[in-house]
Image: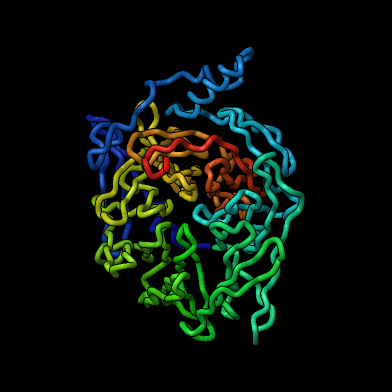
């Protein structure tokens, strides 16, 4: 699994102080050589002049939550819409009865239809999404790619988007035959569906035996086809790691890992398929954690292994010009935490505001705060973490899956806790609350740690959201799918 998620530093200590003028949130970052303290008002005086984000009635009553007897269907829909856009703290109701894989139920609070996509028949330990920027759904919503168990193996299940159903069982891709190496297992943790062919997945071997070779796997024929061999870029102990791809399937990027080295990844690779040209093969000097290409194929995000002595936290490379812009761990640059890359921009966790920022990759030093984890009374909650997905073609909204971070012991309101949400990235403060995930994270067991975090992914058409849940520490974790109305287009690009 990736060790650094989009420049994120989870579990940083945060303090809440009381003063005569109100609640002050202090965010404390402990460094090996220094300590940086940033104070941000939790109410009034938003950082960077952001618009007031405390929309919604003050102290809203919860008497209108779902389940009021005798409501008409129209009233139910109107109430669902209000529940989905309120900043009221909504406690989770009792767990619904959990069906077997393929069974469906309505979220008792938000009314969203949810299907359980996997169960113990698919794996005795659990199944999950891989990560929020690696797609679960193929290009036409006919297959699902999910992680099986704890070792990264893949399970491919049939999905019918019209009947909202999953097929029984599934395909477990086998090993690939590498000339001179024999059969070698394949890495699906960063596998990516082909942008137009619904049967193809890009993937590569999991270790140095053939690990510099890119393949497609055909889910219909169950055959691998070699796309490109990068072995000339490394030695016998090298392999590819953590793949990303532009939305059109033309530009790819990887980390290059060498077995036995302590400074991995040793290099990063950027390749353009249409011209079969390696655009960059660059040594990392031991300070890079991962790289990712944006959906336009014009920019490369470079995440560092923590904050460097000069406070740099990461960099953005413009592929056409070779220009590199570093960003620093400062309130002005506000490096993005958990999130995703869209077409020419990034969006994700804002460490200085307990919210979400959007950053244009041609103006990386000017992030825009677009959302805060703030209740109807204006109180900011610093105890949530999330993963975010921009896999939908409509990039006006980021889809996030929140969870209560067990490493943060600050007072909390519970706002937006353990939910699937969509947040508008245009600065309008709009959001859509989709469902409770019912995943409880304490990091004490495999079934209540990283792989049980929701890590949502969204289909390209915006109609389906896959997420992981351990069903309130049930002892396992599974993939669930929420069926939603696509988020409205807010920009001209999304409407075209």
Q: Residue furthest front?
A: 496
What residue is at 72 percent from the left and 42 percent from the top?
102
336 displayed left or right of 242:
left
Instruction: Point out the image quarter for the C terminus.
Output: top left
Considering depth in this image, is 406 or 269 the residue closer to the camera? 269
Q: In this view of the protein, which residue sits in the foreground, 330 or 17?
A: 330
Residue 488 horizontal/vertical position (percent): 45, 35
For the point 62% across and 43% down, the residue is: 481
Residue 224 location, x and y as percent? 65, 71
- Foreground residue among 493 and 436: 493
In the picture provided, is 48 more to the left or to the right than 421?
left
Viewer can see residue 264? no
Question: Residue 116 at what x, y percent from top left?
Answer: 68, 42
Q: Is residue 486 left or right of residue 42?
A: right
Q: Is residue 364 above or below residue 282?
A: above
Residue 439 percent location from the top left of the image: 58, 43
Q: Residue at point 52% right, 17% down?
A: 63
């Amino acid at each position: 699994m990736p060790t650094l998620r989009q420049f994120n530093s989870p579990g940083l200590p945060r303090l809440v102080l009381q003063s005569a003028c109100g609640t002050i949130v202090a965010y404390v970052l402990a460094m090996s050589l220094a300590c940086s303290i940033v104070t941000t008002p939790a109410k009034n005086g938003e950082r960077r002049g952001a618009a007031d984000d405390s929309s919604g009635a003050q102290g809203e009553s919860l008497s209108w939550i779902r389940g009021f007897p005798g409501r008409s269907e129209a009233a139910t829909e109107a109430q669902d819409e209000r529940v989905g856009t309120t900043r009221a703290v909504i406690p989770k109701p009792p767990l619904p009865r959990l069906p077997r894989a393929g069974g469906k139920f309505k979220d008792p609070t938000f009314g969203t239809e949810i299907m359980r996509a996997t169960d113990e028949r698919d794996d005795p330990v659990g199944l999950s999404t891989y990560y929020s920027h690696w797609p679960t759904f193929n290009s036409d919503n006919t297959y699902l790619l999910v992680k099986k168990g704890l070792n990264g193996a893949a399970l491919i299940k049939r999905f019918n988007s019209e009947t909202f159903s999953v097929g029984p069982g599934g395909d477990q891709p086998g090993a690939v035959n590498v000339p001179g190496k024999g059969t070698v297992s394949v890495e699906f943790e960063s596998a990516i569906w082909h942008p137009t062919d619904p049967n193809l997945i890009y993937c590569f071997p999991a270790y140095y035996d053939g690990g510099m070779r890119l393949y497609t796997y055909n889910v219909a024929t169950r055959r691998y086809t070699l796309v490109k061999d990068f072995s000339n870029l490394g030695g016998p102990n090298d392999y590819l790691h953590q793949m990303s791809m532009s939305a059109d399937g033309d530009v790819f990027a990887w980390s290059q890992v060498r077995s036995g080295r302590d400074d991995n990844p040793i290099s990063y690779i950027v390749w353009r398929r249409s011209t079969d040209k390696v655009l960059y093969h660059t040594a990392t000097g031991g300070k890079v954690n991962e790289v990712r290409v944006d959906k336009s194929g014009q920019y490369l995000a470079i995440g560092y292994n923590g904050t460097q002595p000069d406070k740099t936290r990461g960099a953005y490379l413009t592929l056409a010009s070779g220009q590199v812009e570093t960003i620093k761990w400062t309130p002005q640059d506000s490096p993005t935490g958990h999130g995703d890359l869209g077409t020419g921009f990034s969006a994700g966790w804002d460490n200085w505001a307990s919210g979400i920022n959007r950053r244009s990759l041609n103006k990386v030093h000017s992030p825009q705060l677009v959302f805060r984890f703030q209740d109807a009374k204006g109180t900011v909650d610093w105890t949530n973490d999330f993963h975010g997905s921009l896999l939908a073609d409509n990039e006006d909204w980021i889809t996030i899956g929140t969870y209560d971070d067990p490493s943060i012991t600050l007072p909390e309101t519970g706002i937006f806790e353990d939910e699937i949400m969509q947040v508008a990235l245009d600065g309008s403060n709009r959001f859509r609350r989709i469902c409770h995930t019912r995943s409880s994270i304490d990091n004490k067991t495999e079934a209540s740690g990283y792989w049980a975090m929701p890590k949502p992914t969204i289909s390209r058409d915006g109609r389906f959201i896959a997420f992981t849940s351990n069903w309130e520490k049930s002892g396992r974790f599974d993939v669930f799918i929420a069926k939603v109305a696509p988020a409205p287009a807010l920009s001209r690009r999304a409407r075209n």
